[in-house]
Amino acid sequence: MLESTSGALAEEHDVVMLDLDGVVYVGRAGVPGAAAYLGEARERGARLAFVTNNASRPPSTVAAHLAEVGVPAEEADVVTSAQAAARVLRERYGAGARVLALGAEGLLEALAAEELVPVGVEDDADAAVTGYGPDVLWRDIMAASVRIRDGLPWVASNTDHTIPTPMGVAPGHGVLVDMVRRFTGVTPTVAGKPERPLLDTTTDRCGATRALMVGDRIDTDIVGGRAVGVPTLLVMTGVTGAPELAACPAEERPTYVAADLGGLLEPQPAVAPGATGDGVTGRADTGGWSAAVHDGVLRVDGEGSASDWWRAVAVACWQHLDATGTAADTTAVHSPVAPSAAGTTDR
């Protein structure tokens, strides 16, 4: 259910595509250990590409944020959903096309870089594009929606329903997309993950032949990597926890799982489903941990690394899910961060 490697992931892939929030940083702060892990991954020969569905910030701003958390990055290392959306528009309508743009600075810069002309909601336009922008006015949303309903082609940067903010988790651009879609009856072309344009743009820019996608969200990062046919690494430093992992269907599962970006620096072990029966419908043992789903409830015992804990949990829960069609109850073992490697775990 999880694949194995003989060498470290950073040595087996020429380009590592990294989601940002929940992987490299959380808000303004770096994820513990991330800067050091990524520095060593570079030393081992991997090129790093920072891939974000956030369309509001230009690549220069993202690169500066990365530098603040100890990860040196150039503008060219950053690929945004705004850039992917602009590339889609350039390919369809050509340089000089006039684009009704609802969004923030990152979207407007991306359009200009592709020699497209951002215009207002009442101006002549060849297409419309929307992206997250905290200062977008309701009257402009209404005007753009009417024009989309009346036939103006529409590209959306992404469909993420939530975004992290200093206030906590807040509505993302996907909420706006859903609203406009319901009003207009139009489904937009989506540029960001999990759709192909953003990752295709990244692999093309980097000349990748053996890319790896790394993320903390199954529905965008992992599904997106699978959509473009590259292996994926799920790290457990962001929004995905034991309940989400346990409920992950076969067609959305990551290739590898690790507690954090340290997983780039180590071979990925083989983890096979174990024997079942007598109420046990899922079992996996790896690295000193034993995970079992008994009467639908997950239990983990043993000791070892945090990454091996998550791998054992994933395989045991997926075996149970495939056999029964229901997700294991992980309430007793759920932890928002990787578990301690010490002692016996009964969570």
Image (cartoon, rainbow, N blue to C red):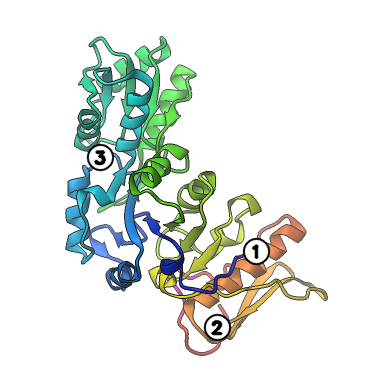
Using the rendered image of the protein, determine whether residue 177 is visible from the camera's viewpoint.
Answer: yes
Query: Which residue is the site of mark 2?
Result: 345
Tag 2: residue type? Thr
Question: Image height check: is 19 above or below 112?
Answer: below
Of callouts 3 and 2, the N-terminal one: 3
Please state if 300 lies on the left or on the right of 95 as rendered: right
Position of the C terminus by quadrant: bottom right
Question: Image height check: is 178 above or below 299?
Answer: above
Please give the range of residues in magenta: 335-339
Discs 3/1, front: 1
Q: Position of residue 66 (x, y in %)?
A: 22, 58
Of callouts 1 and 2, the N-terminal one: 1
Query: Which residue is the site of mark 1?
Result: 1
Question: Image height check: is 230 above or below 12?
Answer: above
Using the rendered image of the protein, determine whether residue 291 is visible from the camera's viewpoint.
Answer: no
Please tell me how crowded label 3 is: few (under 14), some (14-19), or many (20+) other residues with Cα within 10 Å. many
* Main SS class of the magenta portion in the image: loop
Label ID, residue 56: 3
Of callouts 3 and 1, the N-terminal one: 1
| Labels 1 & 2 near each other (Cβ < 8 A) | no
Please state if 201 lies on the left or on the right of 28 as rendered: right
Residue sitting at x 36%, y 63%: 46
Q: Position of residue 37 (x, y in %)?
A: 33, 72
Residue sitting at x 30%, y 37%: 83
Between 259 and 96, the residue placed more toward the observer is 96
Residue sitting at x 73%, y 55%: 325
Q: Position of residue 244 (x, y in %)?
A: 54, 58
Label ID, residue 165: none
Q: CA distance from mark 3 to mark 2?
A: 42 Å
Tag 3: residue type? Ser
Residue sitting at x 24%, y 11%: 122
